[in-house]
């Protein structure tokens, strides 16, 4: 766009607009291939928008001469909720005709600006597509410069991953064993021995030692491989491969497949503001956008060639010597995570581990590196240690040598640190057991088991419980958690934790289950006590508001209490009993004042229905009128369990209540029936049909 030429074109005033014309107006005119729209606000020119009527290219500039690549709406509409239309931005008929004649788009007579916005949107879309095409082209050009993996890399990766491991795979239909080294077949007679699964035999043809495999026609194993090498004068490259080794899949011989997943461009010098850029294998190509879920940095091997050329001049050059040493020794590590932390202290610590031949510890440490601003979590290792003792936090070098000889990891390191700090010995079988079952020293020390059992005692105790109490159905780590849970419950229940029969029970599972039941009983008792306290406070409030109601309950006890063969009716002794019943059964009785008011007025009474064999356990709450008519019967959460079995007993109880009634009870019953009908009528007027239906379902009049 020829911006200088456009700036020289004088602004056009809208037709019929005076100097003091209020509001916004737009004027349209042409300058060569450019359609120019001038925006006037209160008679003052404020902005110009230019569109190439052939291509749709657009730009704007304001009264300060500042150019921006904004479309029409963004240029003229300052309000983010605003709309570009002719009502807000009026334009003359002549100017509308100029726009219509010079736009090569579908004409929309309702809003002249929509046609211009359509042309600009098409241009923006094409420009975005061209920009994306250029980006993809640059990515492809860069990726095409990455050399293919040679045969030497594949052979080295196969040797590191599989070593001398080969199989004699049995082909059942032919009865032939195939050697994955030479690829030739032989029979059991050729081998001169009985071929049993997993035994080792020499191949009678190439004499390679083989592992007999009679159950699967092929086998595979997976690992990762990292390559670091130079790419050009500006970049090194770090490449990640998923490595799969096959036995018996391709012509019966061992083979390897390398699938490249991630490429990391390591920038040299200061020409880029980023230390590196990532490119991911996706959709059959490479792209630096997105992070597909199948691309992961995992523990693997590092190819020894090209490391110096790849890291020199980059922000990661401090790792050059360490990585070259680790690669030459075939050490496994998560090299990408190591590379993420460039601190000298961390590099030196990794060097201590690598040259000290702490292979497993180094591998596990590399997996624990965090990406929090390049600063990682390194478990119990000391970054600023000056020697291996300070790095390990172990001052007995025999323990350090033991960690190296047994190729221990983080778990073993922490146990040896504990033994060194406590001045205790810990056996290799104990360390192996803790490592196998994932029981860390931190779990042991934070728990209660450490107060009663040594690590060796704990191992023997858990193994015995696994065999005797759990019948081999649970793993040791799970049983350890159950033991810790038991000790915690026993302490909270006030058991004598100095008694060996308590802290080391012979039958852990049974004692654990008993402790759970006892704890639940204590919790239930505590809940009942707290509910009773709350009920007492609520009852005191009700008794203050409705004095004399307690006397009513005492007065009706002889008339309403009744016991049958399976059920019995109990009259509460106080308001506290009513509130407690409501809390226990989780319904509204005891929480609503209307029931206490009805008791005081002799409108209805509250009684408890209990099972005969469980007289103290809440079961049903009954609201009964003085004449024996039952208004409501509610169980737990307003449910009605076994109601059909209960109804015959309630009918029997009603007949007994009628026999015990006196003259004043008949008068109370008559008034209660009238109030019941008044309550129903109020509910009908409020159209509360759901409540009416529930009350009618509960209503049991005396027959």
Image (cartoon, rainbow, N blue to C red):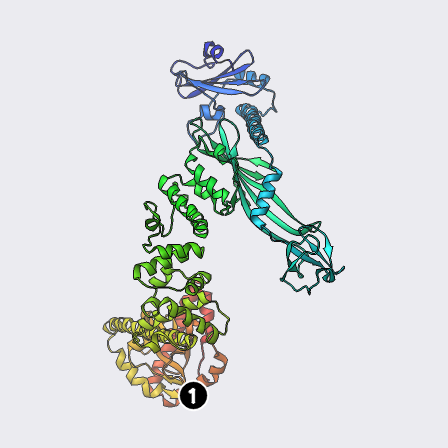
Residue drawn where x is 44% and y is 28% of the image: 272
Residue drawn where x is 45% and y is 23% of the image: 76
Location of residue 631 in the rendering, given as x and y in whole percent from the top left corner: 41, 76
Circle 1 — which element? helix
Q: Is the residue marked by circle 1 packed among few (<14), some (14-19), or many (20+) residues within 10 Å?
A: some
Q: In the rendered image of this protein, does residue 418 appear above or below residue 635?
A: above
- Give the camera-side residue of 428 and 540: 428
Residue annotated with mark 1: 655
Left or right: 137 as drawn, with respect to 356: right
* Image quadrant where residue 632 sits: bottom left
Location of residue 368 in the rendering, given as x and y in whole percent from the top left corner: 42, 49
Residue drawn where x is 34% and y is 84% of the image: 665
Left or right: 178 as drawn, with respect to 554: right
* Image quadrant where residue 660 sits: bottom left
* Image quadrant where residue 343 sits: top left
- Give the camera-side residue of 202 and 502: 202
Location of residue 276 in the rendering, given as x and y in whole percent from the top left corner: 46, 34
Location of residue 495 in the rendering, given as x and y in whole percent from the top left corner: 31, 76
Residue drawn where x is 46% and y is 40% of the image: 323
- Give the camera-side residue of 28 and 483: 483
In this view, the residue farthest toward the right is: 174
Q: Is residue 88 visible?
A: no
Q: Is residue 92 visible?
A: yes
Left or right: 82 as drawn, with respect to 255: left
């Amino acid at each position: 766009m020829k911006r200088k030429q456009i700036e020289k074109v004088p602004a056009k005033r809208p037709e019929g607009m005076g100097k003091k014309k209020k509001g916004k107006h737009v004027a349209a005119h042409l300058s060569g291939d450019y359609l120019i729209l001038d925006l006037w606000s209160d008679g003052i020119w404020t902005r110009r928008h230019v569109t190439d009527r052939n291509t749709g290219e657009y730009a704007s500039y304001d009264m300060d001469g500042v150019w921006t690549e904004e479309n029409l709406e963004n240029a003229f509409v300052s309000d983010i909720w605003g709309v570009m239309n002719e009502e807000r931005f009026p334009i003359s008929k002549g100017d509308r005709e100029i726009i219509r004649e010079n736009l090569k788009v579908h004409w929309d007579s309702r809003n002249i600006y929509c046609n211009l916005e359509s042309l600009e949107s098409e241009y923006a879309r094409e420009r975005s597509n061209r920009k994306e095409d250029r980006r993809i082209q640059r990515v492809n050009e860069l990726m095409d410069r990455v050399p293919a993996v040679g045969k030497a890399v594949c052979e080295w990766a196969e040797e590191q991953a599989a070593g001398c491991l080969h199989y004699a795979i049995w082909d059942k239909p032919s009865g032939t064993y195939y050697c994955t080294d030479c690829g030739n077949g032989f029979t059991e007679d050729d081998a001169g021995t009985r071929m049993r699964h997993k035994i080792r035999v020499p191949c009678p043809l190439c004499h390679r030692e083989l592992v007999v495999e009679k159950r699967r026609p092929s086998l595979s194993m997976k690992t990762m491989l990292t390559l670091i090498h130079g790419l050009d004068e500006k970049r090194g490259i770090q490449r990640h491969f998923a490595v799969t080794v096959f036995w018996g899949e391709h012509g019966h011989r061992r083979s390897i497949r390398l699938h490249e997943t991630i490429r990391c461009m390591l920038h040299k010098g200061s020409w880029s503001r980023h230390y590196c850029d990532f490119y991911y294998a996706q959709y059959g190509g490479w792209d630096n956008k997105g992070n597909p879920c199948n691309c992961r940095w995992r523990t693997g091997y590092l190819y020894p060639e090209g490391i110096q050329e790849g890291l020199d001049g980059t922000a990661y050059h401090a790792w050059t010597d360490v990585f070259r040493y680790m690669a030459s020794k075939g050490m496994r590590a998560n090299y990408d995570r190591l590379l993420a932390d460039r601190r000298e202290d961390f590099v030196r610590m990794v060097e201590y581990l690598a040259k000290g031949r702490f292979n497993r510890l180094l591998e596990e440490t590399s997996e624990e590196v965090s990406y929090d601003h390049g600063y990682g979590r390194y478990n119990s290792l000391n970054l600023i240690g000056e020697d291996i003792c300070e790095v390990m936090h172990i001052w007995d070098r025999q323990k350090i040598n033991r960690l190296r000889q047994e190729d221990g990891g983080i778990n073993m390191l922490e146990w040896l640190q504990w033994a060194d700090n406590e001045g205790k010995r810990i056996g290799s079988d104990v360390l192996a057991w803790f490592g196998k079952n994932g029981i860390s020293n931190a779990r042991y020390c934070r728990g209660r088991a450490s107060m009663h059992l040594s690590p060796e005692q704990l191992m023997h105790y858990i193994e015995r419980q696994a065999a005797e109490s759990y019948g081999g159905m649970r793993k040791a780590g799970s049983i350890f958690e159950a033991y810790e849970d038991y000790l915690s419950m026993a302490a909270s229940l006030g058991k004598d934790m100095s008694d060996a029969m308590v802290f080391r029970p012979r039958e852990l599972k049974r004692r654990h289950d008993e402790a759970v039941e006892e704890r639940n009983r204590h919790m239930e008792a505590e809940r009942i006590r707290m509910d009773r306290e709350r009920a007492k406070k609520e009852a005191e409030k009700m008794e203050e508001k409705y004095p004399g109601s307690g006397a009513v309950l005492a007065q009706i006890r002889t008339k309403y209490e009744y016991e049958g063969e399976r059920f019995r009716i109990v009259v509460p002794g106080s308001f506290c009993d009513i509130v407690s019943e409501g809390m226990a059964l989780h319904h509204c009785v005891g929480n609503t004042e209307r029931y206490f008011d009805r008791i005081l007025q002799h409108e209805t009474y509250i009684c408890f229905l209990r099972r005969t064999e469980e007289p103290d356990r809440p079961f049903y709450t009954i609201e009964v009128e003085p004449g024996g008519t039952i208004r409501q019967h509610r169980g737990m959460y307003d449910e009605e369990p076994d109601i059909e079995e209960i109804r015959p007993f309630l009918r029997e109880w009603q007949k007994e209540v009628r026999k015990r009634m006196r003259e004043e009870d008949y008068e109370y019953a008559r008034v209660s029936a009238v109030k019941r009908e008044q309550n129903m009528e109020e509910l009908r007027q409020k159209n509360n049909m759901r409540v009416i239906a529930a009350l009618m379902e509960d209503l049991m009049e005396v027959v």
